[in-house]
Amino acid sequence: MQARGCSCRLPGRRVSSLLMNTLAIQQMSWEEKLRAMEELWESLSGEGARLESPAWHGEALRETEQRHEAGQEQPIDWAIAKQELRERRK
């Protein structure tokens, strides 16, 4: 993988970072892409407190819970749900 170093200025400090553009990502092997995704996920998941769900998520969960309690919605296996979602996209 080829990437260029980037020196960016933020107010009051200088930040050095690795610039990864679309071209660099396209040139990565499958294994390099997976490794990069794992490293990004690990970094992001360590900042869970920064993640805030949008208000509509809470409303959607409440609506689903109400439908479930009313017998209008039943849970399904995650593998089946993924397959149904894939079929909808076709």
Image (cartoon, grey):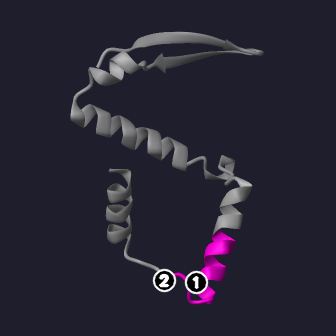
Instruction: Give how far across and how far down residue 61 sits, in percent.
Output: 64, 69
Taking 22 as reference, is 40 above or below it? Answer: below
Tell me the crowding category of disc 2: few under 14, some 14 to 19, or many 20 or more residues within 10 angstroms, Cα based.
few
Q: Assign a secondary structure to mark 1.
A: helix
Amino acid type at circle 1 is His
Mark 1 vs 2: CB contact within 8 A: yes
Instruction: Give how far across and how far down residue 70 sits, in percent.
Output: 62, 89
Residue, disc 2: 74
Query: Quick one: quadrant of the N terminus?
Result: top left
Amino acid type at circle 2 is Gln
Q: Determine the residue positioned at 41% across, 77% down.
A: 76
Q: Determine the residue positioned at 67% across, 47% down.
A: 50
Q: Between residues 90 and 20, which one lies in front from this camera angle?
A: 90
The tag on residue 68 is 1
- Kindly report the distance in space between the C-alpha atoms of the residues bearing marks 1 and 2: 6 Å
Q: Between residues 25 and 82, which one lies in front from this camera angle?
A: 82
Q: Determine the residue positioned at 53% across, 81% down.
A: 73
**How would you classify the magenta stretch by its main secondary structure?**
helix
Q: Which residues are magenta?
A: 61-74
Instruction: Give how far across and how far down residue 6 sits, in percent.
Output: 51, 11
Lateral position of residue 73 relative to residue 81, left or right: right
First along the sequence among labels 1 and 2: 1
The tag on residue 23 is none
